Amino acid sequence: MSRDGGLHVAIIMDGNGRWAKRRGLPRTLGHREGVKALRRTVEGAPDIGVSTLTVFGFSTENWRRPMTEVSELMNLLKAYVESDLDRLAREGVKVTILGRRTGLRPDILEIIERAERRTENNTRFRLQVAFNYGGQADLVDAARKFAEAVARGEARPEDLDEQLFESHLSTAGVPTPDVIVRTSGERRISNFLLWECAYAELVFQDVYWPDYGPDHLAAAVGEFRSRERRYGGVTTDDVLATG
Ligand code: IPE
Ligand code: IPE
Ligand code: MG
């Protein structure tokens, strides 16, 4: 739950390729439609009680795809920021990009930095785009940062606890997701938010990402609200029953 009481929903936007294949279209067209779905979903999120949206746009493993598809995904991130940044900035959206910066094209780095700089003081809504992101890579990077602090004599191994470790992750300072949604029918985490998923509710929706929109997000939030989060404890009823 975010500070303002809104929910944090994280989405593995999956199924662009299958959406296109089903229509006899190239995969890249599925990705283009996926951008439209992202736009609709961001637009509708505040009315559904969501104040932070984290979306998985490109994983550290997606480099294994054909070069043409990889460069299309890079170009789409750029096109999305170029077309939507003014509106996002005006609407009070704080945009951050999670993931490794090394290995990204200079024009992509430039657009990422522009989006973050332009929206850094916004507070109404938070949009985190995981791009060249891998949960394992993020954990390794956090461990490395801490080890470097130790090597510099600025920290001691015995200082390390969950809170300190978390402060080195790329999601530091942002409450962990309440819900992690995966579209397309796949039921796996695919290296997304490995630390942050600890107590997230997982919701799987059988819809290809290009068909997604606010109604699907509302359904995911509805499913979340019907769940009971226990964080390892017991329910109030159980406490009363057992005394
Ligand atoms: C999700 O759709 C977008 C990215 C992973 C970048 P996919 O491209 O994975 O679509 P499917 O899973 O092949 O249908
Ligand atoms: C996860 O989806 C990554 C993104 C949605 C960006 P993938 O489609 O890459 O995951 P796998 O290969 O099915 O596990
Ligand atoms: Mg996929």
Image (tube, rainbow, N blue to C red):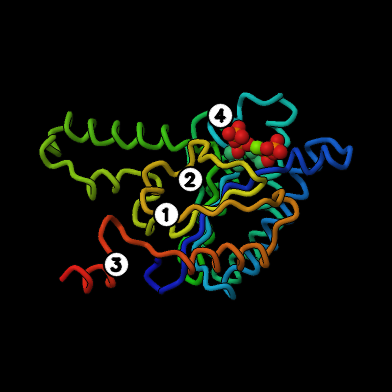
Distance (Cα) linking label 2 and label 1 = 18 Å
Circle 2/circle 3 CB separation < 8 Å: no
The N terminus - image quarter? bottom left
Q: Residue at position x 17%, y 33% from top?
A: 150
Residue 98 disc label: 2
Depth check: 34 or 181 in front? Answer: 181
Q: In front: mark 2 or mark 3?
A: 3
Of mark 3 and mark 1, the one earlier in the sequence is 1
Q: Residue at position x 58%, y 43% from top?
A: 110
Q: Position of residue 75 (x, y in %)?
A: 71, 40
Q: In front: mark 4 or mark 2?
A: 4
Q: Position of residue 120 (x, y in %)?
A: 47, 61
Which amino acid lies under the numbered mark 3 shown in the image of this protein?
Thr
Distance (Cα) linking label 4 and label 3 = 39 Å
Local secondary structure at mark 1:
loop
Distance (Cα) linking label 2 and label 3 = 35 Å
Circle 3/circle 1 CB separation < 8 Å: no
Residue 235 disc label: 3
Residue 171 disc label: none
Asked if the residue at label 1 sits under 8 Å from ligand 2, the reply is: no
Distance (Cα) linking label 4 and label 2 = 15 Å
Local secondary structure at mark 2:
strand
Q: Position of residue 66 (x, y in %)?
A: 71, 24
| Label 1 environment density (alpha carbons within 10 Å; few <14, some 14–19, many ≥20) | some
